[in-house]
Structure formats: C-alpha cells, structure tokens
Amino acid sequence: MDILNQVIEKLTKEEVRNFKLFYGYATDEQRKDLLLFNYIRSSGNKFSEDKANKKLGYDLENKNNYYRLKNRLIEDIGDSLSLLHTHKNELYELLQFINLFHIYHSRNLFKPCLFYLRKAERLAASIENYELLDIVYANFIRLSADLVEIEPTAYIQKRANNTVIVTNLRELDNILASLSYQLKISQNFGSSDKDLLKKLQLKVKDISKQTTSSFGKNLEGRIYRALSQVFLQQHNYIALEKLVKDTYRKFEKEKWFDKSNHELKLQMLTYCANALYKSEKYKESLEYAALLGEEIHAFGKLHYEKYLFFYYNLQVLNYAALNPPQGLKALDEFEYEMRRKENTYYDFFIYLNRAALLYDMQRYKEALKSLVRLYVSDGYTNADKSFKLKTEVGELIITFESADTDTLDYRIEQMKKSFSALLKQPQFKRDFAVIQLIQDMNASANYRQDGEIQKKIKALLKLKPDANSLDNENIIKYNDWLRRKLRP
C-alpha cells in the first residue's frame, strides 16, 4: 500500500476533522487535494490511481501533476498532525521548543531563544530524555556567544555529566539489540545469551545509580518490552511467564504503575495469563485474567475497549479446559458486550469458540450451527484460505462425531475441490492427511479394529508440527482428537 494511503487510513475522526480545518473554508469541490483525500478514504483497498487521476481531471499519460499533488497532500497531513498533537505529548512538545529555538535564532531573536531553551531544559529533565537534553545543552552553549547572562561553564559541565548517561544508554541499547537479535535467530536461551543478559542487568544497575527512580521505571519497561516480544516469537512461555512476573512484582513494589503506563500493566497481566494458559496452569491463568478484568476499569476505563477482548478470550480459553459450560457463559457475555460493534474478528472469535466449546460438551449439532453462522458472516468469504481450511477440517471432525455420514462424504469432496490449490503446499500436508483419514474412517465398518487406519493415526501422531501450526488449528487440536481414535 502507498504511504499516503496508509497515513490516511489510520487517521482518527478527530485528525480528519482537524485536517479539514487546517485547509480553512475551502470546500471539497474547490481543492483537488481534498478530492484526492476523500477518494482515498472512501475507496480503501479498492483505491485505483487511474480512477483518482480521472476524478482529478489529470492526464493519464503524464502523472507528474498527480504525484506533486500527492507529495503536497502528505506534507500537509503531516503539518496538521504536528499541530494537533504537539501539546498532547511531552516528547512532541519538547521537540517543538527546540524547533522554535532554531526559528528565533535564525532571526537573531535571542531572548525568545533563551525562553524556549529553558522550557526545553525543564521538560527534557522531567521526562528524562537525555538524548534531547544533550541537544538543549549544546544550544545553551551556542547561545552564550550572543547573550552575556548565559554562563557557558555551567552548561559545559551539565553537558559533560549528561554525556556519561547518554553513553551508557547507547551501550545499553547495543546490548539489548544484540540480545534481542540472538534470541530471535536461536531457538534456545544459550550460555552466550545468558552472558548478554547478565551484562544488560549490570548496565541497568550502573545507569540507575546515576539517574532517578522514575528513569529506572523507564529502563525496566524498555527491557521488558523488548524481551517479551522475543519470548513471544519463540513461543518460550516459561521464560515469558518468569519475565512478566518478575517485572510486574518490581513495578508493584516500587509503586511505578500509574496512569501514564497503565497500558503496560494491562499488557503484563494479559501476557502472564496467556503464558500460564500455554503451560496448562489454567487456574492461575484465570486469577491473572480476573485481575485484568478489575484493572480495565481503572482510570475511567482507560484502554477498556482494547483489553476487554483479551479478558474474555482468557476466560474462554481456560474454561474450555476446566469447565466448558462456564466458557460458554463467558462467550455469551462477550457477544452481548460486542453486539453493537461491527468487527469481523470478534464474529470469528465468537463463532469458532462457541463451536469448540459445544464440541467439547458433545453438542455436535449446535456446534455445526455455530460454524454455519460463521460461514455466512461478513468477511468469511474473503478470509485467508489457510484459516478457512483449518476451520473446515474442524467441521469435518465434528460432523464425523455427529455420525452424519452422508453429509460428511459430501463435505469432504466439496473441500477437496475448494482447497485443491493448497494441496501441494508442505505446510498443509498434515491438514490434508487428516481429511483423508476422516474419509477412510467414515468408509470403515470399524476403524478401531482396522489396522491400516490405526497405522495412519499413529503416523500422524508422530509428526511434530511447529508451534505456529498447533496455534492455528482453529477449533480442535488434531492430536487430542487422534489420540481418542486409537484402539484401546
């Protein structure tokens, strides 16, 4: 997707409104840039440059005017966003102070320069942005040549002290980047990784001595974010659980959680509950989910909408293992909450999980009805082919359990045609093997006494799919079902 399209697609209603105010009283018909802006917003993924050129009245053979318009539009959107957000974020405000210093300095207005530098120094120190503080001190030293009231020696010393912290931070970033990269490319947490982690911890301790406790909070959060993403990518849930618990306890002990990092707290609770679920510690996972359910109401329900899904997802996942009827109840509550939201992902989540829970409760016909609701929902037609394949293999398993042999034969043949393009792709070999096994079992008088079928089941169980494949088996984990089909 083009950069301009990406930028416009992600604009909020407030940002769109502000952008149009930025253009003053011009109507959409008077300005070609507004025409292009509105066309990109309304067309979404169906955007066509040729259609855009026609709407704008440009020559299709020579698109120079069109590209100049695009470049101006993306610059204007950037200016509008900068104006809107400058005072909503301390970092943006700090950058504005530095920018205003340079504007006034170019006009030899040195008193306003000093005014904005002092504001920048206070703000940079309060948010502990030592990299930008270095630039602020450099500008104080530069301005001392024009204003006698600035004594440069004091700022030279401040800059020297700040340089020590900045140097340490750069070394910390280097260690963290190296550790993150090593963990991403390796499957195990090796001795060299442990050495890097130890070096990282020592560096954090060293920097923390030179800075404030709140900077320690920022450091710990920075390290947590980097390592948690690595452990997630590796599916290393044991390491993720330990990391989250240790970091969460430290933040609680130091009283570092507040409104400004409330989302970090919610994310920690979500990650920890998910890691515990993956390790089959279902009751403990539910405890963290309950804590998440309480915390999403804090600070006037800050981030409530975003984390409500994770709260219910964790309940459904854990109760599916412990108490399927309770999981079904949680799913009904979530559906009620989400009824007014038009979100295809929520529909997929509700219908798939309802089918899985009803399957676990041996209510096969109801499970199949839930899948039918999924198939006729908005978005399923255009859903990813691999998602649809794995979902419909789950449907075959449920249909087999319901003993509807005629429907099963029909659906197997239908699926083989629908997904024939995926047949030769190695990542789907196991899915098609399960389809063939179901067909063989359906044709057998007694599959438990059928030696060939039992061999196939054992062969499939010996295959070791990667973690991604296991996570993507949408309704029913194949191995769980296959084990139940072995001869007693």
Image: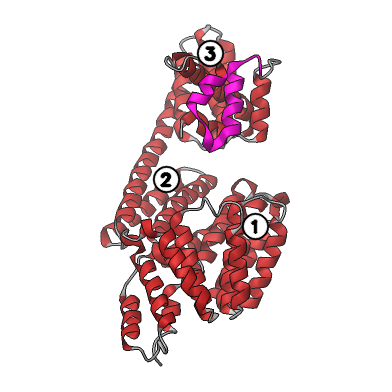
Q: Report which residue position mark 3 lands on.
A: 103
- Cβ atoms under marks 3 and 1 closer than 8 Å: no
- Give how far across and how far down residue 84 sits, in percent: 63, 27
- For the residue pair 78 and 422, the one nearer the viewer reads as 422
Q: Earlier in the sequence, mark 3 or mark 2?
A: 3
**What's the residue type where badge 2 is placed?**
Ile
Residue at (71% x, 58% y) in the render: 337
Q: Report which residue position mark 1 lands on.
A: 308
- For the residue pair 8 and 390, the one nearer the viewer reads as 390
**What's the residue type where badge 1 is placed?**
Leu
Judge depth for marks 3 and 2 and give the one in front.
3
Residue at (31% x, 73% y) in the render: 463
Label placed on residue 207: 2
- Give how far across and how far down residue 118 sits, in percent: 57, 23
Q: How far, Cα to Cα, is label 3 from label 2?
A: 34 Å
Over which residues does the magenta segment extend?
29-55
Judge depth for marks 2 and 1 and give the one in front.
1
